[in-house]
Amino acid sequence: MTRQKMSRPPETERCVESLITDFQKHAGKKLIDCTLSMTESLTFVNTELAAFTKNPKDPDVLYLIMKKLDLSSGGQLGFQEFVNLIGSLAIVSHNSFTRSTHF
């Protein structure tokens, strides 16, 4: 992949790079095995996705979501599971947005 003369990368590319950086930042000391513990996952969601966690009706809902995303049942979220979380939130946001713009 080559870029013409130091041009700025496309927005989507920057978003992907940002997701990778955020995952690695929150993976903490376990970067070697590239996973987020449940605590790290919840910290990520509460700090980086605060708009999605405002006033939850059930305070345990985030933990239950993380547990469901943990496909390996190892108490850790790998990058694939992390991307599944981001994708799920994007789908919910998209659906909400499109419903609110159609009268």
Image: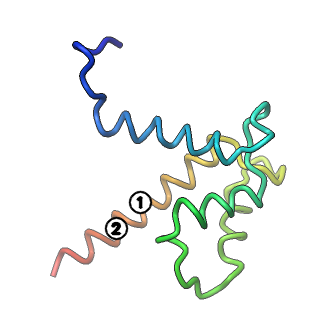
Crowd tier of the residue under label 2, counting other residues whose Cα lies within 10 Å: few below 14, some 14–19, many 20 or above: few
Q: Nearer the viewer, residue 26 or 89?
A: 26
Q: Nearer the viewer, residue 81 or 45?
A: 45
Crowd tier of the residue under label 1, counting other residues whose Cα lies within 10 Å: few below 14, some 14–19, many 20 or above: few
- Name the mark on residue 45: none
Three-letter amino acid code at disc 1? Ile
Which quadrant does the N terminus fall into? top left
Height in image: 96 above or below 35? below
Q: Quadrant of residue 11?
A: top left
Measuring from the top left, give residue 81's x and y in whole percent.
64, 47
Measuring from the top left, give residue 37's x and y in whole percent.
78, 53
Which residue is under mark 2? 95
Q: How many marks?
A: 2
Q: Please indicate whether residue 33 sits to the left or right of residue 20 in the image.
A: right
Query: Which residue: 58% across, 83% down?
Result: 56
Q: Give how far apart the Cα atoms at labels 2 and 1 are.
A: 6 Å
Q: Nearer the viewer, residue 52 or 99?
A: 52
Which quadrant does the C terminus fall into? bottom left
Three-letter amino acid code at disc 2? Asn
Query: Which residue: 54% across, 59% down?
Result: 48
Query: Which residue: 28% across, 33% down?
Result: 10
Height in image: 13 above or below 49? above
| Local secondary structure at mark 1 | helix
For the residues bearing labels 2 and 1, Cβ distance under 8 angstroms: yes
- Name the mark on residue 91: 1
Height in image: 85 above or below 52? above
| Local secondary structure at mark 2 | helix
Query: Which residue: 58% across, 63% down?
Result: 47
Q: Residue most toward the bottom?
A: 57
Q: Please indicate whether residue 44 sits to the left or right of residue 14 in the image.
A: right
Colour basis? rainbow
